[in-house]
Amino acid sequence: MVRKMTKEQNYDVVIAGCGVAGLYTALSLPRDMKILMLSKEDIASCDSMLAQGGICVLRDENDYDAYFEDTMRAGHYENRRESVEIMIRSSRGIINHLLALGVQFEKNSDGSLAYTREGAHSRPRICFHKDITGEEITTTLLSHVKTLRNVTIMEYTTMTDIIEKDGICIGIKAETQEKGELLIYAHNSVMATGGIGGLYRHSTNFPLLTGDSCRIAKEHGIALEHMDYVQIHPTCLYSTKPGRSFLISESARGEGAVILNHKGERFVDELLPRDIVTEAIHKEMEKEGTAYEYLSFENVPENIIREHFPNIYQRCLEEGFDLLKEPVPIVPAQHYFMGGIRVDSDSQTTMEHLYAVGETSCNGVHGKNRLASNSLLESLVFAQRAAIKIINSERK
């Protein structure tokens, strides 16, 4: 029997998770704070890396009402209005900061940002980098975090619990790859462990995303919210191979791709909210007695396919489908979790000194169904707000 060794460590802030929410929290904290970041596996195995479509931004003041309504309508008006307003009003500042950090968003010939459109958006307002926007943002943030002398990153280290004393969070328990236990004491702890896709047979998420933070929160009586609000993405590449489902970005439909049944007929407006499109596909599959339907790129110009969707194009080729010549089989799969640990507008949980950011949190911005490309923005906005709240609390 191998005996576990328990080690104690002390930090100002400990962050469980190294996706965009965790990374941006670390970047937004002062350089004199000692910070520890934990990654369950290697740093690249986070869902932020997989985001394809892009990140929303308020284009101008004339777009505010439409953007607000698009978000609310997609969420079935169950969104927290305050959270939606905060996200939208903060979006331009976030995009400007990402540009300053070196994120390479696509631009027009005059140097202005290029925008694409996705389902349930009334106009193009999505910044993007080809069809790997999440990877571009995450790797850029990570490169900056790695330069910070006050931040330590531990890979293959899993948060197993929080340390609670008198109803206050005073740190995190974790287990390393070598099965050693860590007691990490910190003034403030941040949960940023992502969603729940690993609990599903078919998901676009990495299998390691198993709702760890939500489980721990429940065990400590920390409030959860809307745990049944799970988003199924309508267009994932159909495959009989085991493993993670490959998502075909909604921006493909924004650029003209259409959904067809086995007769070659359209049966749904492709730019409706995701839950509605998913329901229509499931009904058509049941009606036809098939395991998938089709996504056709016939109306999408070849240069758009090759320049905007090179990753999708290549992956489909690897599966034996040429987007330029034929429709590809698609099927819905679990994609995103709108529920999670209930937080306020500063990402504070119902336990003092414990924060939750990113997909593991529920600040109410998405309501019952997330609007396309709001996830990266929401993660960054409310990670920044968590950092500001931590800073202010330490100054008291």
Image (cartoon, rainbow, N blue to C red):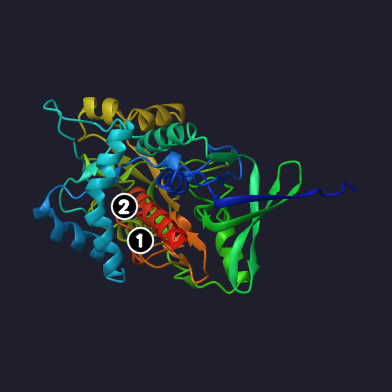
Q: Badge 1: how crowded within 10 Å, few (<14), some, or many (20+)?
A: some
| Whether residue 390 is situated above or below residue 99 in the rendered picture | below
Which numbered disc flags the more N-terminal residue, 2 or 1? 1
Kindly identify the residue that appears in the image at 34 percent across and 58 percent down: 370
Q: Which residue is mark 2?
A: 374
Evaluate if marks 2 and 1 touch, with contact meaning CB atoms under 8 Å apart: no
Placement of the C terminus among the 4 image quadrants:
bottom left
Q: Nearer the viewer, residue 273 or 22?
A: 22
How many marks overall?
2
The label nearer to you, 2 versus 1, is 2
Kindly identify the residue that appears in the image at 59 percent across and 50 percent down: 11
Q: Residue furthest right?
A: 1
- Element type where label 1 sits in the image: helix
Expressed as whole percent of the image width and height from the top left, the position of residue 362 reads 42, 64
Disc 1 residue type (three-letter):
Glu
Q: Residue furthest front?
A: 396
User: In the drawing, does residue 23 fall left or right of residue 242?
Assistant: left
Disc 2 residue type (three-letter):
Asn
- Element type where label 2 sits in the image: loop
Q: Which residue is mark 1?
A: 279
Q: Nearer the viewer, residue 349 or 265?
A: 349
Expressed as whole percent of the image width and height from the top left, the position of residue 391 reads 42, 55
Expressed as whole percent of the image width and height from the top left, the position of residue 256 reads 21, 40
User: In the drawing, does residue 272 fall left or right of residue 214?
Assistant: left
